[in-house]
Structure formats: C-alpha cells, structure tokens
Image (tube, rainbow, N blue to C red):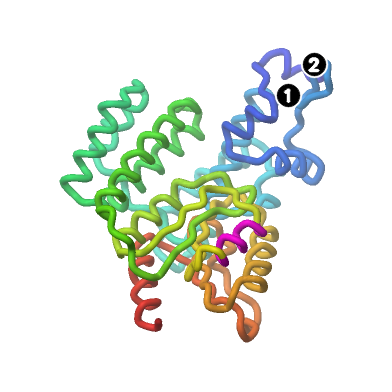
C-alpha cells in the first residue's frame, strides 16, 4: 500500500465504491485529476484502493449532490466542511420557498415528513424480512391505492433508505433488497391497473441517459402514466442516445420520459438534451424529472423552430397535468 491510512482501514476497489455510492468510475477518476480528491492508494497491480474514510466522505458528497450542489462546490471540501454543509442542507429542507438555499430554488422541494409506520418498514429491511416488507407494501397498496402508496409512503421511504445507506447504517445489499421488493410490488400493481388492456395515447418511452443507473424514480413515473391510461415503453436505464432515437422512431413514441439524479454532470445533461432535441422528430415531447438541478434552471434563448417541446417535471403529480395538456392539444 502507498499510504498509512490504507494499512489501517479496509480497502475498497473503484468498482466497490461505484456500487456503494452510485458514483461512476469515470467520475471518480475525473475528480481525482480535477479536484485532488479522492486520493486512492494503489495495490501491487496499480489498481485504485479506497479506505473507509474516503468512502464515507464520498457518501457525503453524493448526498450533497442529490441536494442540488455542484461537484466543484463540494468535492474539494474537507470532511469537516462537508459535515457543516450537510448540516445546513438538513436545515434548508424545512425552509420556505424563496430562500436562497440551492435545493429550494433550483429544484423541487423535498418530500413530506415520513410516516410513523415507515420505522417498522425500516426494521423489516434491516432484519432482511423480505416477506414481511413485501406484505406491508402490498397491504398499504390495497388500503391507499397506487398513487397514494407512492407519494405518501414510497417517496419518504426512499429518503429514509437513502439516508441510512449514505450514513453507513444500511448495507448495500439491504438497499438492493429494498429496491427489488419495491420494484416487484410496483410492477405487479401496474399490471393490475392495466388489466391487460392496451393503453391510450400518448405513447411514452421511458429511460435514463448513459451514466444514470438509477431507475426507481422512472418506475414510479411509469406507475403514474399507467394510472392515466397511457401506453408505456420502458427501456430500463442507461440507454445510449442512438438507441433512444431509434426506439423513439420505431415505437412511434409521442413522449420521451427521462429520469435524472444529481450525480450526472450538468454539462453532460445539457449536451445530451440538446442532441435529443436536435434529432428527435418535432412531435416527440421530452419530459424530464428527478433531482437534477439543471433541469429546472431557466433555459437560455428561445427554442429553435421545429424543436421538440421540453417539459421538466418537478413532482410525480405533474404527470397527470402533462398528460391532460397533451391530450387536450392532440
């Protein structure tokens, strides 16, 4: 090992860090060159090795990125400075709209406070009681319906799971277990809502761009589209741009729905959206949602004639309004 900390702390490969934090390997390498952090040791084969302290610091950075901060603002900060900024972030989540905090002025507000029963669900998750958690979610689905299950329970539960994972209180495999259980419940619910019947227009293609591996938000958006009776074509995550364009053409899509988190570089997001707007047929609208601040920033200049419309979706509930608008204008 090449550092004193590496001998005193368990080591993690760059693939381990990517799986744990959701930060892509290329992103970690770029930060290393550009900001001087992280500072991995090297093993005998020259492969990067990250100790626990760096992994914990990267988790904090990921949390702040999800809250709307940019990499250049947080990656170079010390661990103490990150702690202070994270404390400010927690306080900003309860500020009223119009404050100068990045989360409130550049992106949708955080979800409402978690319900008491979510603590029981977290306990089921920590004990890996998959059957009990699946049953609890299914029972809540029966009692509240799909839309309320998502907005009132799943969204705040996602926050609790993500926070516990970033704090190191939830193992990676437990976070994966939660995701698998929730995906199963939501997909089964969509099948029941659809009842095997063909959907109505608009026809919506759903995916994320390369470098965005998180698809749970996209799945929740699909649930709301199915509740509106839409035809959905889910492509999964990280679809290359040429494949998105081909799929939009061959599927006859009316809408391209994209999901984002804050881990993606804003310049990359802008560039990808610009390419899609240049190459998609003008009739295909782009709906984009998630906690990526660049989606909600004012766009410079007027759109070119014949450019597909771009609609940022700040909340899942915006989907029903957007579907109504599309159908009224079709």
Of residue 260 and residue 67, the one placed in the foreground of this image is 260
Answer above or below: position of 195 versus 12: below
- Asked if the residue at tag 1 contacts the one at tag 2, i.e. Cβ–Cβ closer than 8 Å, the answer is yes
Quarter in which the N terminus is drawn: top right
Residue 183: say if magenta. Answer: no
Name the residue carrying label 1. 49
Answer above or below: position of 107 versus 303: above
Instruction: Identify the image quadrant of residue 9.
Output: top right
From where the camera sits, is residue 147 visible?
no
In the rendered image, residue 82, in percent from the top left (x then y), is placed at 60, 41
Q: Residue at x 62, y 84 (%)?
A: 302
From where the camera sits, is residue 262 visible?
yes
Give the CA separation, mark 2 to mark 1.
9 Å
In the rendered image, residue 32, in percent from the top left (x then y), is placed at 77, 39
Furthest residue in direction bottom, as rendered? 305
Residue 244: say if magenta. Answer: yes
First in sequence, mark 2 or 1: give its number.
2
In the rendered image, residue 245, in percent from the top left (x then y), is placed at 62, 63
Left or right relative to 303: residue 328: left
Of residue 131 and residue 50, the one placed in the foreground of this image is 131
Q: Which mark is residue 1?
A: 2
Q: Residue at x 45, y 32 (%)?
A: 175
* Magenta stretch, residue numbers: 241-249
Q: Residue at x 68, y 43 (%)?
A: 77
Indicate the secondary structure of the residue bearing disc 1: strand
Answer above or below: position of 199 versus 81: below
Q: Main secondary structure of the magenta part?
A: helix
Q: Residue at x 55, y 64 (%)?
A: 250
Quarter in which the C terminus is drawn: bottom left
Q: Which mark is residue 276?
A: none
Of residue 18 and residue 221, the one placed in the foreground of this image is 221
Furthest residue in direction left, as rendered? 143
């Amino acid at each position: 090992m090449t550092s004193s900390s590496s001998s005193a702390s368990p080591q993690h490969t760059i693939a381990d860090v990517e799986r744990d934090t959701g930060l892509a390997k290329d992103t970690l390498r770029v930060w290393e060159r550009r900001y001087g952090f992280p500072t991995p040791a090297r093993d005998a084969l020259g492969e990067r090795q990250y100790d626990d302290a760096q992994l914990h610091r990267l988790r904090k950075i990921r949390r702040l990125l999800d809250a709307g901060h940019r990499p250049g603002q947080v990656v170079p900060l010390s661990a103490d400075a990150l702690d202070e900024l994270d404390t400010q972030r927690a306080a900003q989540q309860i500020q009223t709209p119009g404050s100068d905090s990045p989360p409130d002025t550049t992106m949708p507000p955080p979800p409402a406070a978690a319900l008491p029963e979510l603590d029981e669900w977290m306990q089921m998750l920590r004990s890996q009681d998959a059957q009990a958690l699946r049953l609890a979610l299914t029972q809540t689905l029966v009692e509240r319906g799909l839309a309320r299950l998502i907005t009132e329970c799943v969204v705040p539960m996602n926050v609790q799971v993500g926070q516990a994972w970033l704090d190191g209180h939830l193992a990676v495999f437990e976070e994966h277990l939660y995701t698998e259980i929730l995906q199963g419940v939501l997909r089964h619910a969509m099948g029941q809502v659809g009842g095997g019947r063909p959907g109505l227009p608009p026809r919506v293609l759903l995916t994320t761009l390369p470098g965005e591996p998180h698809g749970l938000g996209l799945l929740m958006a699909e649930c709301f589209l199915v509740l509106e009776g839409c035809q959905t074509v889910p492509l999964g995550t990280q679809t290359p741009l040429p494949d998105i364009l081909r799929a939009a053409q061959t599927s006859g899509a009316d809408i391209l729905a994209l999901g984002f988190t804050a881990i993606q570089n804003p310049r990359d997001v802008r560039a990808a959206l610009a390419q899609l707007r240049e190459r998609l047929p003008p009739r295909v609208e782009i709906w984009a949602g998630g906690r990526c601040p660049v989606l909600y920033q004012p766009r410079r200049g007027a759109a070119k004639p014949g450019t597909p419309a771009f609609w940022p979706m700040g909340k899942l509930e915006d989907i029903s309004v957007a579907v109504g608008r599309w159908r009224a204008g079709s």
